[in-house]
Image (cartoon, rainbow, N blue to C red):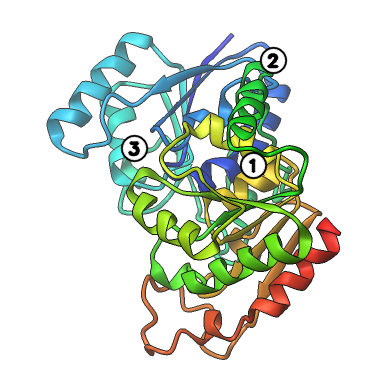
Amino acid sequence: MARVLIRLPNWLGDAVMAAGPVSLWARSHPDDELTLSGGPGALPVFENADTPCRLLPLLSTSSSLSALSAEAKRLRELQFDEALLLTNSFSSALVTAWAGVPVRRGFRAHSRSWLLTHGIPFPSPQNHQAAQYNLLLNGTNEMPEPRIHLTVEERAWADDFLKTEGVTGEPLIGMAAAAAYGAAKCWPPDRYAALARRCVDELGARVIFFGAPSEAERICSLCQQTGRGAINAAGRTTLRWLFALIERCRMVVCNDSGVMHAAAALQTPLTAIIGPTNARITGPLAPNANLVDKQVECAPCMKRECPLKHHRCMTEIGIDEVFEIVKRRVS
């Protein structure tokens, strides 16, 4: 039996895309002891997983030498036989090398090849992110679909939350108007509010807006613009409770974001509004995902802010177009 550490990606969406490859690795190595290491945006994806594993939160998200040294010391005490690095950072390779992990496998990137015992050539940048993770873990370019597994208690919490908000059986539509990468990935907020009003008025739906605590003020404004039927969930949930609410939605409308990938992993129908990013590389892995992507000539630019200042990849996506997709699912 080998003691294996998998260092997870840092962001929620990336962690979800890694979930399928991690599950496949665990099923094909039933005799090994698996530990998953990651930050607060990654580990909740793997709670209540369908394969046994230990979750090891990072001591710190800092990249200071003192923080990296403390992390290395803890890993050394746990005596891992192998580390599989789904992060491409120099620091993650340095930590496992300092920890003396005998086998350290990861992609050759950021001048860290000398820290790896098994440096894997970086795959084509046109491969889907999930395929890249699967290549490292399982040696193939397959894209196993991710799954997030909820507990009975988490589903009960979501039911109680919605009952408190007065949801009594109306179609529930989730909306996530933000994206961690930057403003260029975001459909204009006033269009989300207008879409939400139409969902309430024409479909008899309730609309629940998701967001981080830092987005609470913005989400409050969207709820005020929507009026009756809006629910503000920003900053009121843990990630696991957020997952439970997403599962209860008839559909989720979102930007290219962690919520998009979570909805895919929860098998909740979704409509993803794509702008400056490349859906072939980071798109949701779900057969019930609708992608609205104008594919203007300057996209995908992969920029945090529109370098041309017109943001046409998003502004050319109309409210009617998105509403018709939602209507087909909810009606």
Say if residue 164 shows up in the picture.
yes
* Closer to the camera in the image, 71 or 288: 288
Q: CA distance from mark 2 to mark 1?
A: 31 Å
Residue 93 is tagged as 3
Q: Amino acid at mark 1?
A: Ile
Residue at numbered disc 1 = 246
Residue 30 is tagged as 2
- As helix, strand or loop, the secondary structure at mark 1 comes to helix
* 128 lies left or right of 234: right
Q: Amino acid at mark 2?
A: Pro
Question: Which label's residue is closer to the chain start, 2 or 1?
Answer: 2
Q: Position of residue 286 (x, y in %)?
A: 75, 51
| Number of marks in picture | 3
Image point (59%, 8%), residue name: 1
Establish if 178 lies above or below 259: below
Q: Position of residue 90 (x, y in %)?
A: 30, 45
Establish if 17 lies above or below 193: above
Question: Which label's residue is closer to the chain start, 2 or 3?
Answer: 2
* Closer to the camera in the image, 159 or 237: 159
Q: CA distance from mark 3 to mark 1?
A: 35 Å
Within 10 Å of disc 3 (Cα), the crowding (few <14, some 14-19, many 20+) is many
Residue 122 is tagged as none
Image point (54%, 67%), residue name: 193
Say if residue 146 shows up in the picture.
no
Q: Quadrant of residue 134?
A: top right
Q: Position of residue 78 (x, y in %)?
A: 37, 10
Q: CA distance from mark 2 to mark 3?
A: 25 Å
* Closer to the camera in the image, 168 or 86: 168
- As helix, strand or loop, the secondary structure at mark 3 comes to helix
Q: Position of residue 142 (x, y in %)?
A: 73, 48
